[in-house]
């Protein structure tokens, strides 16, 4: 279809970015990827997708990509995502997530790229007083990671007000799972995502799963989170791109979650169910800054996009994560 414009995916060799590339290519969009491979994997980019190894801070490279690919939209996933690291090394996060996003945005404006989709986060809300969280909830990040992403959101809004570019910022809750066809998944060594850690434990790659805090104001005392399947999240990006193209003067900021939460223990029980074995749990103290509950109010995305999640089932998310973890083990 003629409305499928060329898209550049930054960080397209990483976890979420690679799933966005799959969703775009599956739907027939022309796609190219830029990734510096600091945390991504060259093999995660499908055959036939133009790949540029480089940094989004490199304006000359971006200008060349835009010209060679005829880029008309950017999906921006490149960045650093580990919250504790952001507290220890804030300048890394303000550089990778904020300053580099500014460079990318400047290159997009200079080249006249009209559409920009940004990988944001529920960490922009900090510790919300009310859960589920709406997009209008106060943005009070409690760590440099959340602040670095919020600053980029603000930059996007100001830039869209001054230039012919519109954007969609999607605030992710807890992304989990893997491509149902096992074409990609969470592959980073030492990942901190609960479901990734739990399936590693189930396969004997870890001896136990640490549970941080058992005295939260939740039904079983452990933290409650909204887990969204990475393929459903990727599909939301494709639909958001269509919405930006359909209404070029409108920008969007939307939560990406299912609107229901599971506790840490419920997630571990699901892994036990799926694997038919019991993971060793070690209860430890709370981590600083972990809210009791963080669940998305997703009414806005459901009202704005024709988004119908296909994998909104905890056991399914675990099954796909487990299948990918087994494939990684075979890869060696």
Image: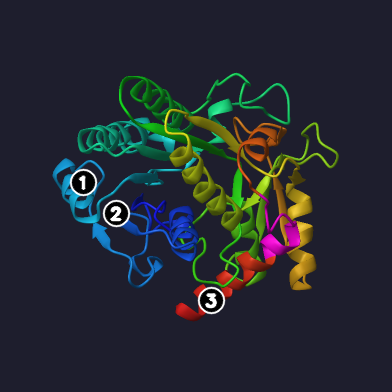
Quarter of the image where the N terminus is located? bottom left
Residue 147 seen anywhere in this rendered image of the structure: yes
* Colour scheme in use: rainbow
From the image, state whether disc 1 or disc 3 is nearer to you. Answer: 1
Q: Secondary structure at mark 2?
A: strand
Q: Position of residue 134 (x, y in %)?
A: 66, 27
Cα distance in 3D space between marks 1 and 3: 34 Å
Which residue position holds label 2? 34
Left or right, 174 with reference to 252? right
Left or right, 64 with reference to 283? left
Mark 1 and mark 3 residues within 8 Å of each other at the beta carbon: no
Q: Quadrant of residue 95?
A: top left
Q: Is residue 8 magenta?
A: no
Extent of the magenta region = 308-318
Which residue position holds label 1? 62
Q: Quadrant of residue 174?
A: top right
Q: Position of residue 242 (x, y in %)?
A: 49, 45
Q: Secondary structure at mark 3?
A: helix
Above or below 291: residue 261: below
Crowd tier of the residue under label 2, counting other residues whose Cα lies within 10 Å: few below 14, some 14–19, many 20 or above: many
Which residue position holds label 3? 327
Residue 192 seen anywhere in this rendered image of the structure: no
From the image, state whether disc 2 or disc 3 is nearer to you. Answer: 2
Along the line of sight, which residue is nearer the eye, 208 or 244?
244
Cα distance in 3D space between marks 2 and 3: 25 Å
- In percent of the image, x 56 and y 70: which residue is there? 324
Mark 1 and mark 2 residues within 8 Å of each other at the beta carbon: yes
Above or below 215: residue 75: below
Q: Residue furthest bottom?
A: 330
Which callout, 2 or 3, points at the residue further toward the start of the chain?
2
Left or right, 248 with reference to 287? left
Number of the label disc, if any, that sits on residue 226: none
């Amino acid at each position: 279809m003629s409305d499928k414009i060329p898209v550049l995916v930054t960080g397209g060799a990483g976890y979420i970015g690679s799933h966005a590339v799959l969703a775009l290519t599956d739907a027939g969009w022309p796609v190219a990827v830029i990734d510096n491979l600091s945390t991504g994997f060259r093999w995660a980019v499908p055959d036939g997708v133009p790949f540029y190894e480089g940094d989004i801070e490199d304006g000359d490279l971006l200008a060349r990509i835009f010209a060679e690919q005829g880029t008309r939209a950017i999906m921006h996933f490149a960045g650093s995502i580990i919250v504790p690291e952001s507290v220890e090394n804030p300048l890394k996060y303000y550089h990778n997530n904020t300053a580099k996003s500014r460079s990318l945005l400047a290159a997009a404006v200079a080249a006249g790229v009209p559409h920009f989709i940004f990988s944001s986060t529920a960490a922009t809300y900090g510790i919300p007083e009310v859960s589920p969280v709406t997009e209008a909830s106060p943005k009070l990040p409690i760590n440099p990671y959340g602040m670095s992403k919020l600053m980029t959101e603000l930059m996007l809004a100001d830039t869209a007000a001054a230039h012919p570019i519109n954007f969609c910022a999607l605030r992710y809750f807890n992304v989990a799972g893997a491509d149902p066809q096992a074409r990609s998944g969470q592959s980073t060594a030492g990942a901190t995502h609960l479901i990734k850690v739990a399936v590693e434990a189930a396969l004997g790659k870890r001896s136990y799963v640490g549970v941080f805090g058992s005295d939260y104001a939740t039904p079983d005392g452990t933290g409650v989170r909204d887990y969204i399947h990475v393929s459903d999240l990727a599909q939301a990006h494709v639909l958001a791109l269509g919405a930006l193209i359909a209404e070029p003067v409108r920008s969007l900021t939307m939560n990406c979650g299912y609107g229901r939460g599971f506790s840490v223990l419920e997630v571990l029980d699901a892994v036990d169910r799926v694997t038919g074995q019991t993971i060793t749990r070690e209860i430890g103290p709370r981590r600083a800054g972990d809210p009791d509950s963080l669940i998305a109010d997703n009414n806005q995305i459901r009202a704005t996009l024709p988004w119908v999640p296909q994998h909104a089932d905890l056991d399914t998310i675990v099954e796909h994560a487990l299948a990918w973890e087994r494939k990684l083990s075979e890869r060696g």
